[in-house]
Image: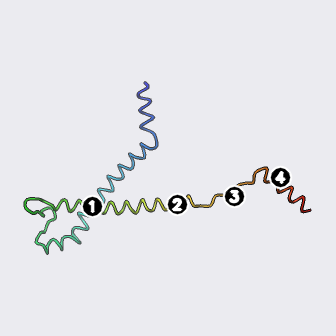
């Protein structure tokens, strides 16, 4: 029974669940980026350049038997993902910095400070 209990504690910790959610969202984000590259960027930007180079299909690009078209597509996808993640991390760090820089509420004076202030006020009178 100890093994099952230990596994439950591990599997349902916040970090493990957060990591699982991040992996699932990352996979979905990868699908979105693949669609962006394959369905939007390639037809709008790359196809005119490929037609000018007499290579109508990116996947068919080859040189000396080496098909580098898919590799170019993977590089474009990677750069887009890296760029978007860069901006997400940058925004998260900025939000964290703002949270850390927020002024702390003034601390209540200690009992010694209160006593000294009372003595000072009494002496002024």
Q: Which mark is residue 106?
A: 3
Q: Residue at x 32, y 52 (%)?
A: 27
Callout 3: helix, strand or loop? loop
- Residue to which mark 2 is pinned: 97
Q: Nearer the viewer, residue 51 or 96?
A: 96
* Rendering quarter of residue 40: bottom left
In-image side of 67 versus 7 (left or right): left
How packed mark 4 is, by other alpha carbons closer than 10 Å (few <14, some 14-19, many 20 or more), is few
In-image side of 4 versus 28 (left or right): right
Q: Single out the mark in the foreground, 4 or 3.
A: 4
* Image quadrant in which the C terminus is located: bottom right
Task: Specify which label sits upstream in the sequence, 2 or 4.
Answer: 2
* Image quadrant in which the N terminus is located: top left
- Residue to which mark 4 is pinned: 115
In-image side of 108 versus 90 (left or right): right
How packed mark 1 is, by other alpha carbons closer than 10 Å (few <14, some 14-19, many 20 or more), is many
- Residue to which mark 1 is pinned: 77
Task: Specify which label sits upstream in the sequence, 2 or 1.
Answer: 1
Q: Single out the mark in the foreground, 2 or 1.
A: 2
């Amino acid at each position: 029974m100890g093994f099952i209990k230990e596994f439950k504690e591990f599997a349902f910790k916040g970090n493990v669940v957060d990591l699982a959610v991040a992996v699932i969202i990352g996979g979905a984000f990868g699908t979105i980026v693949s669609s962006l590259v394959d369905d939007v960027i390639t037809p709008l930007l790359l196809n005119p350049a490929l037609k000018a180079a007499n290579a109508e299909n990116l996947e068919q690009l080859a040189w000396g038997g080496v098909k580098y078209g898919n590799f170019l597509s993977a590089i474009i996808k990677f750069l887009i993902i890296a760029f978007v993640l860069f901006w997400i991390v940058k925004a998260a760090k900025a939000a964290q910095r703002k949270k850390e820089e927020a002024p702390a509420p003034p601390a209540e004076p200690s009992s010694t400070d209160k006593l000294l202030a009372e003595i000072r006020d009494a002496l002024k009178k």
